Amino acid sequence: MQKIKIVLLAVLLLMSASALSCRLIITEKTEKTEETGKAETEASAATEPEVSLKINDEETSYERYERSVAFYYPDADSYILYYREIPVTFTTRGDTGSTLAAAYREADPSGFSDGLEINSLGLDTENVVRLDVGEAFVSGMNAGAMYESLILQCIVNTFCRYYDAEHLALTVDGGTYKSGHLLLEEGQLLSADYTGTERAE
């Protein structure tokens, strides 16, 4: 009976030692796994490049298109209003006023448009053309009352025809039009009139 107890005790001691050994092995493996995972994470973090996001300025594309435009000018001898149609190249988002002013100087043989500087040009919600020119246009005109009125009519016809409108409001540097011969009231509208106009050869 005593032998059996000793054998059982020995078996229990062996089982306890085996369990403790297994626990130590598992713990060691777990620690090694954790250390390996941590090392791999640190190595990965060290080798991965920093991600930087750079937002470039939006590229704006401009399209070119061509349109035929009629430019009116007066004849100093006959007082007849002539017009010439020439192709004008525009760009989307471009300055329509500057483009038309440059084309006007090319199409006008009378020379009155040489001093034409357009500050702003557009069509309002009431279908009225709004044209603001620089003071140089008025000061450099040097014309009599009759010829000046013909010049203004040419301006009105040109831009009203371009916008397919009937009326134009003309201002000079944001103020009323005033010269040595003519004075426009604030808000006064000028009307297009193509009567008797002729196409230039």
Image (spheres, grey):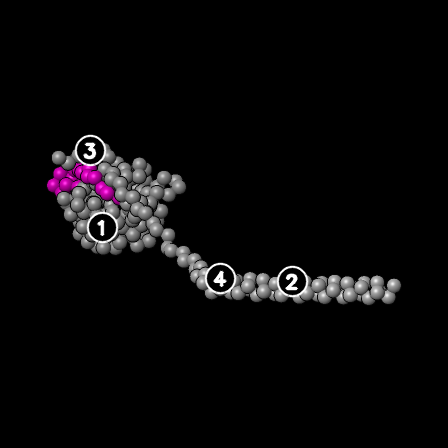
Residue under the image location 37 percent in, 43 percent down: 124
CA distance separating discs 1 and 2: 93 Å
SS type, badge 4? helix
Mark 4 or mark 3, which has the lower sequence index?
Answer: 4
Residue corresponding to mark 2: 26
Residue under the image location 12 percent in, 41 percent down: 77
Q: Nearer the viewer's eye, disc 4 or disc 3?
A: 4
Residue corresponding to mark 3: 196
Q: Nearer the viewer's eye, disc 4 or disc 2?
A: 2
SS type, badge 2? helix
Residue corresponding to mark 4: 44
Q: Residues within 10 Å of mark 2 (few under 14, many from 20)?
A: few
Where residue 52 sits, quadrant-wise, is bottom left
Residue 117 seen by the camera: yes
Where residue 106 sits, quadrant-wise, is top left
Residue 145 seen by the camera: no
Q: Nearer the viewer's eye, disc 4 or disc 1?
A: 4
Q: Is residue 80 magenta?
A: yes
CA distance separating discs 4 and 3: 85 Å
> Which amino acid lies under the numbered mark 4 shown in the image of this protein?
Ser
SS type, badge 3? loop
> Which amino acid lies under the numbered mark 2 shown in the image of this protein?
Ile
87 to the left or right of 94: left
> Which amino acid lies under the numbered mark 3 shown in the image of this protein?
Gly
Residue corresponding to mark 1: 116
CA distance separating discs 3 and 2: 108 Å
Q: Position of residue 181 (x, y in %)?
A: 23, 50
Q: Nearer the viewer's eye, disc 1 or disc 2?
A: 2
62 to the left or right of 75: right
Magenta stretch in the rendered image? 74-90
Q: Are marks 3 and 1 in contact (CB under 8 Å)?
A: no
